[in-house]
Each structure stands twice: as structure tokens, then as C-alpha cells.
Amino acid sequence: MSAIFGIINKHNSSVNQADVNTMSIKLRHHAVDNQKIFLRENIMLGYHQLVFHHSQKNEQVPFESGQYLIVADTRIDNRVALATLLGAKQKPTEIADSWLILEAFKKWGKRCVDYLEGEFCFLIYNQREQSFFAASDHIGHRSFYYYDSPEHFIFASELKAVLAVKPPPHSFNEDIIIRYFVVNYNEQTPIKNIFLLRGGHYLSYDKQQGLQQYTYWLAHKTGKYRFQSLREYGECLRHLMTEAIKNRIEIDKPIGIKLSGGLDSSFIACILGELLAKQNKSFSAFSSVAGKNDINNPEDESYYMKLLGQHIPNMEQVFVTPPANATPFDNLPQLFEQGDGFMNPLHYLDTALMEAAQKQGVRLLFNGYGGDHAISNPYREYIFFSLLQFKIKESLKVFNTIRHTYQISVFRLLQSSILYHTRFYNFLKGLSGKAIYNGESFFNPELAKSIKEYENSQSFDTKQWLQDRINAGVLGCEHQLLNYRDAYFGLRKTTPYFDKPILELYLDVPDTMMFENGYKRGLIREAMKGIVPDEIVWRKDKKSYSPDFENRLGAINKLKQKLVNEQAYQNIWPYMNKKRFLTNKETDINNCLAIMLFNYISYLKLHIN
């Protein structure tokens, strides 16, 4: 994505040129295609451009229009309808998104965000009134970090750019440790007094009221989608996904996709292939496969990937295996610096896939991430939650349907769909030293208690859980963290499953529709019928995204002991439970997460204080 940044000195003191240079340098990896800085006395607005949509070629931000200045990082999806409402004389393809946003603000004021669809974050400064307005899109796809004080307002697309010029002191925000595990960011960042603007919110500042934050949208069941059958819901999903992909592919640069062979990425790949074929274009698919010494790995998805390759004639396949010695623990300080947050343990695979895409010149890289958060959610908690609501008949129907379709024993299904979600089951696992992964595993008692209290308060309703994550800013922040490193590879990953219309459809779909035809994820399977090979549509398994992950972990216990003994890491023990860290019997993935968290806390403490 592109990056925006700026400094507003509220008492009209001149912006320091050294601070301008510092912020620009921190974000220079975004300046692939262009960069521009507006500097006038007490205000600086900057823009580093990475083009991945044709509308960006018209961008000249920051730009001045009368008393207003605007800087924006956007992809407006309803640009044709918006241009009509605004009475634009130019063709929609000739209009910059930032112009549409500014004209919408002039026409509707703060309500302009109600007319915008797509991904965006922007700031509009009123030079006459010395006020400003800043907003993030509904979900929070584009990041907007900010620091506010009586003297300054500093903002940027990345945390490190704000931190680099923020006046001291810089203090580590201990609450972020809890919030990483209770998925409730509420604008918190690892630095006290630096915040992340949530999706569906905007900021407004004037000299009388100071800085105020407002909510303009919350995820909820809209009642917009009321169909009678699964077929109708499936057709609607296919239409919305087609539109979401179509909105993204207006670009004259190579396009790619991270393809796993699962339902979510396969659905996107098949629609993408059809749309690009109409334009006489091809695209590349980048897939993770097991190495030569691991060709019989049961987690390898090569069969389904090759099946898609035969089905989509304009898709060039690139199979990727990370270096044999790559592990989740490589280069963590550098990755934390690049990523502005806690890293995905599969970062080594993400790096290999993006390097392959970069070699092909790919600028826009689709992925299927987020499907199982919503529209293809397997509803693992549904039976348990329905029983709590005394929906006995519905629970039994779904239980028996799944048992017969997937040929699962009664005991195994009881364990996975009911017992697993009870506190008693977690208690029994805890007695064996194999507690389900949560804060109790590795944190000191006080932090663990805070995490447990929050976890016990969470709803078992899958849709309510998603609504809470969206409205607390978690979904947007998660998306941002996954994409922060994109600019280092000169590309942008894009996630259609997190589009607002698709999330709204999911919230309106009756829960029972997700189990139609006896299969979990019934809705997405219905939408895939006829465009995705049947063998993929009706597959019952889902293999690992990284087939050789377990083999790359190495001697975890030795690594843990080494970290405990090194002086550089002693600053983390106020937060971590040393005994549990060394002696727990967690699964390898959870040990991996603990080690990465260990490194992340230490990194933050060393680089902030």
C-alpha cells in the first residue's frame, strides 16, 4: 500500500525539517512509484506511493483546493456512483480518489464517510479554521497511527514513523500484551499515547473542542439479505465476490494469488481466472509445497493445486519451498522492525512467496485469508452454543448430519463440538500440563488472570464474536499486520473476504445454512458450484498452509533454555512465567508462539525505553 504521514503544530510553530526527513525515511519502502511532501509553516503532509490500482495514477496528493489540504491512501470502489452524486464532469477513470473524498467532504461534511465504499484512510486540513478531519474505512484496511498533545498532532501509516518524531518520553504499553491475546485492541499500540484509528471511526479537531473521536459505522446484522434458500445466498455470495475481485484488478501490472488448494483461495482463483480471461490476461499462482526430501508429506496440497492448474488455463503456477534451514525464529528483530507488530509464525513462508511474486513483477497479490473468519466459517462452536440456548432439535440435526457426512464417531464429535468448548475440559487438560493455548500458559499470574477473565466473558455466538472483533478494531488491525511488509517487496496483498458487503452478507445468513447438504462451510460450497472443480468443492479435509512447519521448529526446548539464560532477555520476566515457559507440554505451534512473544516483548522493551 501507499503511505501517508504528517505533522500539525497546533500553536503555529514551524515544522522541523529534520522531523520531515525522519518520517520520510522511515516510510521510504512505500515510495516505489512516487513521493510528494507539502510543507508550509506549521503543517506538513506527506505521501509515498505504491501503485496497485489505475485510479492511483491520477493521484497528486497532498494537494490544495481552496482552504483545504488533503492526503489520502485509498481505493474507492463506488467511484462511478460517487462521481455522479457529486456532479463530476470528468470521466470516473480520470478522477483521483482523493478528489472524490474532498468533494464529498465539501458537500456532506463529516457525513462524507457514509458515502464511501472501499479501503481508505485520509486527513483533510482546513487552513482557514486550523481544524482537521481524519477517517478510516469501515473495517480498517488502511492503517492510521496518531499521537496527539496540546502542541502537536502526528500521524502516519506506520507506527515507527510516528514514534521516530514523537516527543519523549516513550513508554512501553504493558496492556498490549494482554490485548494481543484477548483480541481487543481498542486503538492500543505497544507505545503509550500512540493510537491506531479503528475502522468505522473518524477524528475531528478544532481549537474549541480539541480532538474528538466518533463512530460512524458498527458491524451488525442489517437484514439487507433475506433469501429463502441456500442457492440464493450462494448466488449472492458469488456476485459479491466477483464484484470485490473486479474492483481490484483495474491495473496494468502483473497480478498474482497465494494459492493453497483450500476452498477460500480456490474460489478467488477461479473467479479471478474468468475475469482476467475476458481481458485476455493471465495471472500467477504462488503455492507452498513440501521440499524434495519431504515429497510424501501428508500435509502437502500439491494435488489440489495442480487440479486447479488444469482447470484455469490462464493461470501460471509457481511452486515455492522456503530454504531448508528457514525457521520461524529467523531474523525476528528485523521482522519486528518491518512489521510494526507481533509476527505470524509462518513469516518465513510468507517471505518466500512474496519473493517469488516480486521476481514475477507482481504488484497485486490476492489471498484467501479471512474466509474462515466469516463466510466459510466451519462453525466449530455452533452445536455447543445451540445447546446453551436450548435449541436441542437444531443441535441434534446438525450433529447427526456432520457425523454421517464426515464419518466421525459419536465420541470424537462430542469431544470436538461440545466438550472442547467447556471449562471442565480445559481444566482436565491443564492437569496434564497441556492446557489449551491461552494466557495462563506463559504469563505471570496477574496477566494470566486478566486474560482469563476476558476470555470467560466472550460470547460463544460465532457471529457476535466476529462483530466484536470488527468493532474493537481487531479485524482491521489483523489485516494491517499481515500486510505491513508488502511494500518491502513492491506489492500489495489483498483480501476480498474482509470486504464490508461480504461480511454483512455473512452476518445476515441463517446459521443453519452453513450446514446445508451435510457439509460444514455450506454457503461457500454452494457459491463455488459450477466454477470450481467438484473435487475441491466437496473435499472434507483441509491440510496445512505450510506442510513442513513442524520439521522446521528444531530443538525448541534448547532454544527456550538459551533465551532464559541470556542477559538481554531478562527484562521480560515481569510479564512471563519462567517455570511454565520452560516446563510446559504445549504443542509445538504454541511453543513457537511463546518464543516469538518472548522475543517481541524483549524487542519492545529494548527499543522503546
Image (cartoon, rainbow, N blue to C red):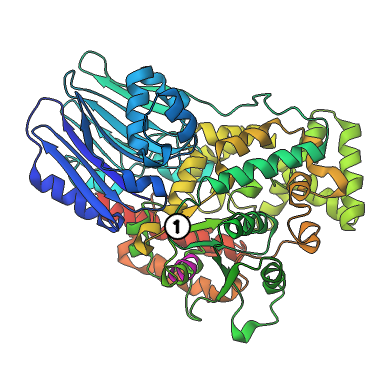
Indicate left or right for 276 with 15 as reference: right
Residue, disc 1:
343
Residue 298 among those drawn in magenta: no
Count of all numbered marks drawn on residues in the image: 1
Q: In the picture shown, does residue 142 fall above or below 334?
A: above
Could you tell me which secondary element the residue under label 1 belongs to?
loop
Compare residues 56 and 558 and report the one nearer the observer.
Answer: 56
Indicate left or right for 181 with 518 as reference: left
The magenta segment: 350-355
Indicate left or right for 86 with 70 as reference: right
Residue 283, located in which quarter of the rendered image? bottom right
Compare residues 218 and 335 and report the one nearer the observer.
Answer: 218
Q: Main secondary structure of the magenta part?
A: helix
Q: Residues within 10 Å of mark 1 (few under 14, many from 20)?
A: some
Q: Amino acid at mark 1?
A: Met
Residue 337, located in which quarter of the rendered image? bottom left
Compare residues 528 and 517 and report the one nearer the observer.
Answer: 528
Residue 485 visible within the image = no
